[in-house]
Amino acid sequence: MSKITKNDFLAGQLLLIDKPLNWSSFQAVNALKWAIRKQFDLKKIKIGHAGTLDPLATGLLIICTGKFTKRIPELQGQIKEYTGTITLGGTTPSYDLETTIDKTFAVDHITDELIQKTIQQFIGPIAQKPPIFSALKKDGKRLYEFARAGQEVEIKSRSVEIFEFKISKINLPVLEFRVVCSKGTYIRSLAHDFGKALGSGGHLSSLRRTKIGSYNVNNAVTPDVFKEKLLPDS
């Protein structure tokens, strides 16, 4: 990351951040905001991210400052790429490891051929239900608020598109995958639905966002590295 001045941040910067595990996207934005304000003695600065990552996911988070915050809707609409693991044989209410396994299933019927055949159901435009453990709103409340209160709620399916879905390694019950998808796709839902289609149940056990449009996580830095490079040499 080259030296960026106060005027650069105010005029607008697009920052590529590699979000650490167990950080919320809000925490990452906040860490950068306070570092920039402290460094340049600013009372305020416009800053926001172009697409949330769950705390249990790592990888690319695009953070915009100043006038570049106007670009956030455009960036949110870009095609995204993810890699990660799906663990078969068990489901969780959150579709990932935020909650514990509630049902278990056999996996001894699963073959490479079944996996490759089942994948075809998930390529192209598909109808997908978001997880109830998500920040989407219904009747003015976040879905996860209903979930944590143990309340039943109807969640409507929505159309998303899966451009690529490939299993790169099979080591049952764990599958390593790569997905390229449209805006609005929940990889947790994809993992859950894929496991269900295999007749074994499944949940997302790790996730990393590698690309947003033409932006690559290989060019990103962690929040800590950003702060180190932002501060002057002692």
Image: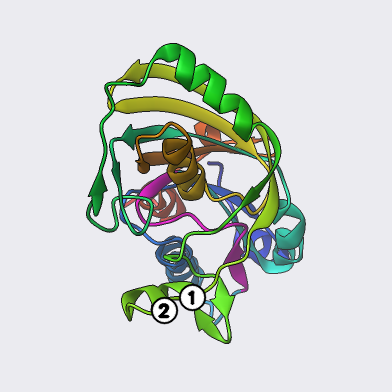
Q: Does label 1 or label 2 sit earlier along the sequence?
A: 2
- The residue that mark 2 highlights is 146
Q: Secondary structure at mark 2?
A: helix
- The residue shown at (69%, 41%) is 79
Q: Position of residue 169 (x, y in %)?
A: 39, 17
Residue 202 numbered mark, or none:
none
- The residue shown at (28%, 22%) is 172
Q: Position of residue 125 (x, y in %)?
A: 73, 41
- What is the quadrant of residue 208 in the picture? top left
- The range drawn in magenta is 46-58
Q: Nearer the viewer, residue 34 or 110?
A: 110
138 lies above or below 56:
below
Query: What's the magenta bit mostly, secondary-structure-wise?
Result: loop
| Residue type for callout 1 | Val
Contact (Cβ within 8 Å) of mark 1 with mark 2: yes
| Residue type for callout 2 | Phe
State yes or no: residue 48 in magenta: yes
Direction from residue 47 to residue 21 in the image, left or right:
left
- What is the quadrant of residue 38 in the picture? bottom left
- The residue shown at (45%, 66%) is 132
- The residue that mark 1 highlights is 153
123 lies above or below 191:
above
- What is the quadrant of residue 66 in the picture? bottom right
